Image (cartoon, rainbow, N blue to C red):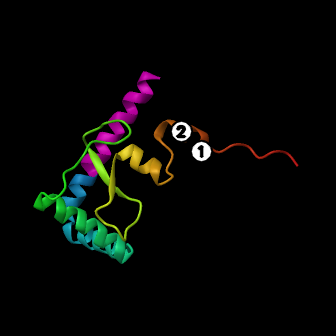
Amino acid sequence: MQQLALADALHRERMKEYRRRYRRRHPDRVNEANRRTWNGFAPERRQAYQAVRNALRRGEIKQEPCEVCGDKNSHAHHDNYTRPLEIVWFCRIHHAERHGVPSPTDRTSLRARPLDAA
């Protein structure tokens, strides 16, 4: 089991380095892909993101720790994009859970199961 965890960690590090090198070698491709993704968001979502970013920069609001676990590395979550500065702070994991993405520990339940015999 430890070997599997070690191999998994090594693979993650290698992939992280691969992505880093790719971004350095192909900045135009990466920028274009990011632009297409960003433009694919709903306009009110982009505006809410920008409003939070600007308010943080101006000091009107400050980043708070995750409201669930207290992690200081938190993300702003909007329940309603029409009220861009009404936000809740979540860490990456709890933010994903808020959007319905299962946590890494719950992902074992997503594995394929055999179909029942009819």
Q: What residue appears at the point 15 percent right and 59 percent down from the top-left corner?
A: 60
106 over 32 or under it: above or below: above
* Image quadrant assignment for residue 109: top right
24 over 106 or under it: above or below: below
In the displayed structure, does residue 13 sit left or right of residue 60? right
Q: Nearer the viewer, residue 17 or 47?
A: 47
Viewer can see residue 63 = yes
* Image quadrant assignment for residue 21: bottom left
Q: Is residue 15 magenta?
A: yes
Instruction: Look at label 1 and name its amino acid.
Output: Leu
25 over 42 or under it: above or below: above
Q: What residue appears at the point 49 percent right and 50 percent down from the top-left corner?
A: 101
Q: Nearer the viewer, mark 1 or mark 2?
A: 2
- Secondary element at image label 1: helix
Instruction: Look at label 2 and name its amino acid.
Output: Asp
Q: Nearer the viewer, residue 108 or 101?
A: 101
Q: CA distance from mark 1 to mark 2?
A: 8 Å
The disc placed on residue 106 is: 2
In the displayed structure, does residue 27 sit left or right of residue 75? left
Chief secondary structure of the magenta portion: helix
Q: Position of residue 22 (x, y in %)?
A: 24, 58
